[in-house]
Image (tube, rainbow, N blue to C red):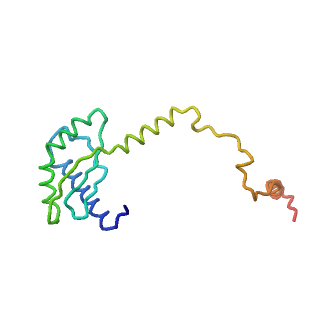
């Protein structure tokens, strides 16, 4: 679904506030080194899906920490927002970072990656002038023929 500019601003504001809370106001060490990658606030602002990422070996402990701290984060968020209702927070693991890393690793390990094939006739544009290179070289050499 396409987002309006106002909705993007709401989502970004929620992300900034939650990231600030995690950085400066929550003292749970399990929530250290957690990155809030995005937020999606519902149109009525009653629910906020918070997407986060961290090291893969910490997924379970961070999920448990968010479950325990969600009430405190919601209260602190309500103080910073001018919204009528403090949204219910749902913390969801953002798997896009892991997927991108897995793809990058697969490309690095692929022996054919980065190896360019010799051009074929299908790679040459149909309207290419075969004599254009010869004329350009002759012109650069000073043998311009009109």
Position in image of residue 22 (x %, y %): 20, 48
Left or right, residue 25 beside residue 34: left
Q: Residue at x 40, y 41 (%)?
A: 99
Q: Is residue 40 above or below residue 104?
A: below
Position in image of residue 103 (x %, y %): 46, 39
- For this rendering, which residue is in front, 16 or 45? 45
Position in image of residue 3 (x %, y %): 35, 64
Q: Residue at x 22, y 50 (%)?
A: 90
Query: Image quadrant for the C terminus?
Result: bottom right
Left or right, residue 146 beside residue 102: right
Q: Is residue 8 above or below residue 122?
A: below
Picture quarter containing residue 53? top left
- For this rendering, which residue is in front, 107 or 80? 107
Q: Is residue 64 above or below residue 7?
A: above
Position in image of residue 19 (x %, y %): 24, 51
Left or right, residue 76 beside residue 144: left
Q: Residue furthest front?
A: 1
Q: Residue at x 22, y 39 (%)?
A: 62
Query: Image quadrant for the N terminus?
Result: bottom left
Left or right, residue 132 beside residue 58: right
């Amino acid at each position: 679904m396409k987002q309006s500019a106002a909705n993007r601003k709401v989502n970004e504001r929620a992300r900034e506030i939650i990231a600030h809370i995690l950085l400066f106001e929550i003292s749970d060490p399990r929530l250290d080194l957690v990155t809030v990658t995005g937020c999606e606030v519902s149109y009525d602002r009653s629910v906020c899906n918070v997407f986060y990422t961290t090291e893969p070996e910490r997924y379970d402990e961070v999920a448990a920490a968010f479950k325990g701290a969600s009430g405190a984060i919601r209260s602190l968020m309500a103080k910073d927002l001018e919204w009528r209702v403090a949204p219910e927070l749902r913390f969801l693991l953002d798997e896009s970072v892991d997927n991108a890393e897995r793809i990058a690793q697969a490309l690095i390990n692929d022996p054919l990656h980065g190896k360019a094939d010799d051009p074929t006739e299908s790679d040459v544009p149909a309207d290419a002038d075969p004599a254009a290179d010869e004329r350009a070289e002759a012109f650069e050499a000073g043998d311009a023929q009109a």
